[in-house]
Image (cartoon, rainbow, N blue to C red):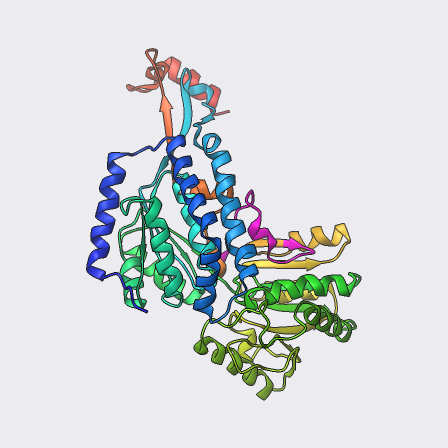
Amino acid sequence: MSNNTPIAVLGDLLNAQQQAFNAQLLPSAEQRIAWLQALRKVLAAEQQLIAETISADFSHRSHDETRLAELMPSLEGIDYACKNIQRWMKPSKRKVGLAFQPASAQVLYQPLGVVGVIVPWNYPLFLSIGPLTGALAAGNRVMIKMSEHTPRTAQLLKELLGKVFSEDLVCVVQGEVDVAVAFAELPFDHLLFTGSTQVGKQVMHAAAKNLTPVTLELGGKSPAIISADIPLADAAQRIAFGKTVNAGQTCVAPDYILVPEDRVTDFVAALRTAVLKFYPKLADNPDCTAIINQQHRQRLQDTIADAVNQGAQAIAIHPETQDQRLPLTLLLNVTDEMRVLQEEIFGPILPIISYTSLDDALAYIRQRPRPLALYYFGHERDEQQYVLHNSHAGGVCINDTLLHVAQHDLPFGGIGPSGMGHYHAHEGFLTFSHSKAVFSKQRFNAAKLIYPPYGGWLQKLILKFFLR
């Protein structure tokens, strides 16, 4: 299936959006809300077609997962933005120091211009609509580059957005890696990329040629910590959901689990029970999502083989199937030399690592690149605060996984190798806006008291007063 956008056309699309933006520099709140309501209407009307199309790109994707993990947060995010746009757009009054009175100060929030969005394949709807919502709420024009691994979804989104937006407001770009490279090199006013850390570095390098500011939503290895006293059945159920939804192909999926050494055996048993309750069988189960393609499936199988060859114990929850589905595989006795602890897993593989004390678990995490998410399971409030204050992560869930991403009043973003910048919530509006500082004076000008020539008695008095 090929609907590639010619590279030569990219500049024309950008120019058209830039010209349209310059003709309407500050869209009203009513205009922005109308854009978002039109977007919501077309997505809500085509739910079934969207689910079917994404499933076709995956060879099988649970329709319910698409509704829960893509459609629902997309629609709720639009509703949240519509309710808050007017408040977000209001100028923010700021204080003026006594030495500069009489005067006023405020911050005006202006659209940046044209925003580029590079979308990964794992959640092709949510990870395109989420940034689009934030950028439109801030009054921008948007160009979206969809992943080459989800061509059907890309074509469908192009058609759906084309029903409600002109191309000089929102357009969808399709194509292989060469198109993505050319897209990243365009002189956008802001560029948001979601994907791997390795590709994120390349995107940032390309954007630097135009000094294009970037928001990078990357991945990494998000840990979960099991406390010494949390009921294992409850923790295992919540971790099982976070790891098996979308077959683990989620940037904030738990990447490895730190478990007290005397609880490892019981935790493995609890996790097996939870997974089998969710998915009694794997083959032909409509609830089980497939691995996106054979290349990624082989990568995951090679990761398991590498660990086993170096001494890890592999525990597959289900017998392996012959289709694109892959069973959740637990790995025990893992070491740092294994690929599974060096690379982001992005699939249904879960290393389980024992620890002796909470400080040891936190030290283990701190010795590694800062993760996109951290999950702590324990009901002791003091320990919860201790974990929060002694760790760094893009976001944290206490006694849950994944769901912080779906909270529309919380920012989402990484830290260090797991990303930079935020979107979602008010922070998303600010990411896609220019905060213009405005200092205003009227007829009376007290500042002339400090104009040259210097050294007068009044200047000395002013300096003496303010430089105490």
Residue drawn at x 39%, y 68% as measured from the top left: 149
Up-down relation of residue 135 to residue 308 (above or below): above
- On the image, which quarter does residue 179 sit in? bottom left
Residue 43 image offset from top left, x and y in percent: 45, 49
Left or right position of 250 against 114? right
Magenta stretch in the rendered image: 397-416
Up-down relation of residue 397 to residue 240 (above or below): above
Residue at the far top in the pictured view: 444
Residue closest to the eye, 405 or 439: 405
Residue drawn at x 44%, y 40% as measured from the top left: 429
Left or right position of 12 against 74? left
The answer to whether residue 229 of the structure is visible from this angle is yes
Any magenta on residue 303? no
Any magenta on residue 415? yes
Residue drawn at x 50%, y 77% as measured from the top left: 324
Up-down relation of residue 13 to residue 149 (above or below): above
What type of secondary structure mainly makes up the magenta span? loop
Residue at the far bottom in the pictured view: 309
Residue closest to the eye, 380 or 463: 380
The answer to whether residue 422 of the structure is visible from this angle is no
Residue drawn at x 45%, y 78% as measured from the top left: 294
Residue closest to the eye, 362 or 333: 333
